[in-house]
Every structure is written in structure tokens, then in C-alpha cells.
Image: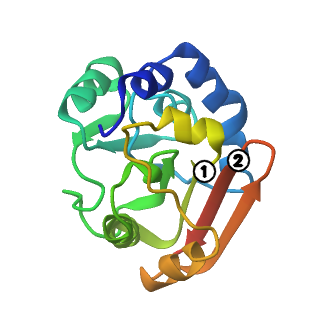
Amino acid sequence: MPMNRAHRKLCSSEGWAQTTKDRILPWALEHVELGADVLEIGPGYGANLRVLVDQVERLTAAEIDEDTARLLQSQWGGRATVLHADGAELPLPDVAFDSVVCFTMLHHVPTVAHQDRIFAEAFRVLRHGGVFAGSDSQPGFRFRVLHFRDTMNTLDPATLPARLERAGFTDPVVDLHLESGGLRFRARKV
């Protein structure tokens, strides 16, 4: 994972897991019907996964970092399918999921082109009528400090809808949460 030590410590903490459960996921998934088969791209240390696994019938998680994928497999493998895979090259069949989600991870993807490949893969594996939804952070002073010597490639809310449309999605919606400095998005595959 392209994160510095302080960032890894924060993202693996119980405090972060509680923030995810109480604030991030409820806001990011407000009015989103996940369906039965859900793919999470970039679960990291599993803060989102531990919530999602109780909300959906079948959860698959694709984690790029091999050690983290192994950790998730040992903790959640009995309740979720955990893959060691790059979200831009998923070893999954076409139209396999009712929804694809990702939370606070896209800013760790080093380039816009790589992010766009993740969007294209989300579209490819999503069933018709399905939704791609998630959230990420926006830059601010504390966010920049946390990302010192860390990968930080934040999403531009002004250009994100067009990027999602280029991947094939329709009706993209991007909202900002000014208090938290967060961004949420959702788009459909018709």
C-alpha cells in the first residue's frame, strides 16, 4: 500500500473502523441499493469490509497489497471472498456484481490514468442496472500532513462525472461534504 507509517497506523486503528461505520459508509451509501453481490475495490485493512459483510449476501474484496490481502483473508475469508488484485485488472468475469464500491482509497492510486482503469473495470464487472458508489477525501491541511511522503492523488469533483461517463457509466452524481472534507460519488450501468 502506498502509505506512510502514520497513515497505516491510522487506517488500521479501531478509531478509524468506528468512523467508517458511523460516518463514512452511511453518508457514502445513502440511498444506494447494493444488491446481493458486492465488490469492494481497495478494502485496505478492512474497516469498510467488516461493515459491508453484515449488509450484503455475498461480498468480494480486491486488495492490491499482498500482505494486506492475506491479513483480510485470515480475518474475513470465511465470510467474504478476498482477492489479491489490482482494481484496474480484476481477475473477475464480466457483469458479475450488483454493485461495486470503493471508499477513501482512490487518492492512493498514483495516476489519473490508473484511476480511470479502475473505473473501467468497475463498469466491466457490474451488472446492468447496477451502481458504482464510493467516497474519498479532499485535500486540506491535515490531509496533506497525513500524506507526507505518501501517495496523494485526490479526485477533482469538477471532472469526476465526465471521467465516470467516459468509463461507460450514466447519471454520475458527485457530492461534497464540506464539514468532513469528503466527496461521494455514484453512477449507474444501464
Is 142 located above or below residue 12 in the figure? Answer: below
CB of mark 1 within 8 Å of CB of mark 2? yes
Measuring from the top left, give residue 188's x and y in whole percent. 56, 73
The residue wearing badge 2 is 181
Check disc 1 and report its element: helix, strand or loop.
Answer: loop
Which residue is pictured at 52% across the width and 46% down the height?
103
| Amino acid marked by disc 2 | Gly
Measuring from the top left, give residue 13's x and y in whole percent. 50, 16
- Of residues 83 and 20, which is closer to you in this image? 20
Report whether residue 65 is seen.
yes
Is 107 located above or below residue 173 in the figure? Answer: above
Q: Quadrant of residue 119?
A: bottom left
Which residue is pictured at 72% across the width and 34% down the height?
23
Q: Quadrant of the N terminus?
A: top left
Q: Which residue is situated farthest in the right direction here?
A: 179
Which residue is pictured at 65% across the width and 46% down the height?
140
Q: Is residue 107 left or right of residue 20?
A: left
Mark 1 vs mark 2, CA separation in Å:
7 Å
Measuring from the top left, give residue 67's x and y in whole percent. 20, 27
Q: Which residue is situated farthest in the top direction here?
A: 14
Q: Residues within 10 Å of mark 2 (few under 14, many from 20)?
A: few
Check disc 2 and report its element: helix, strand or loop.
Answer: loop
- Of residues 163 and 79, which is closer to you in this image? 163
Q: How is the image coloured?
A: rainbow
- Of residues 146 and 91, which is closer to you in this image? 146
Q: Is residue 78 left or right of residue 19?
A: left
The residue wearing badge 1 is 139
